[in-house]
Image (cartoon, rainbow, N blue to C red):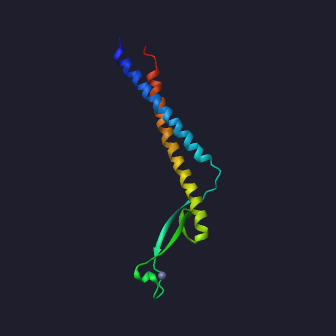
Amino acid sequence: MGTVTSFLRLDRMKVLRHQMQRDSERVRAALETIQHREEMVAGSVFERRRRCGKRGCRCEQGKLHVGQILSVRRAGQPVWTSMNASSSEMTVTLVGNYQRFRKARRELMQTFQRLIEAVDELGCLKLKES
Ligand SMILES: [Zn+2]
């Protein structure tokens, strides 16, 4: 008795095992990113286009000045700093490190959530019917 149910149960267990395998690879990849030694800056970088206000400047014809802005939070408030060419390359790298770190952290959270759900479901399926 219970043959069909057993097949369905075994199928589902197989799917869960595959999913857990993929998730453990995701965890490993995310931890690799998190364990990188590079320093980081908690912020974001964006481009600002503006007119400078000087008479006769090319920006009056619509060729706006492009600058890179670093945005960080201090005491919960965003603080913007404009970057010059020499500081921006390094800052972009450091902010990129931070963005990758945060993305890996999000990935870990989602994967752990999915893993623990799979663990619980697998636990139920493994319970011997009495
Ligand atoms: Zn200008």
79 or 101, which lies in front?
101
Residue that extends furthest to the right in the rendered view of this protein:
37
Residue at 48 percent across and 25 percent down: it is 123
Q: How many numbered marks does the figure carry?
A: 0
Q: Is residue 61 above or below residue 78?
A: below
Image quarter in which the N terminus is found: top left
Residue at 58 percent across and 47 percent down: it is 33
Q: Quadrant of residue 89?
A: bottom right
Q: Is residue 101 above or below residue 27?
A: below
63 or 20, which lies in front?
63
Residue at 42 percent across and 16 percent down: it is 129
Q: Position of residue 12 (x, y in %)?
A: 40, 26
Q: Position of residue 85 (x, y in %)?
A: 58, 71
Q: Quadrant of residue 60?
A: bottom left
Residue that extends furthest to the top in the rendered view of this protein:
1
Q: Position of residue 26 (x, y in %)?
A: 52, 40
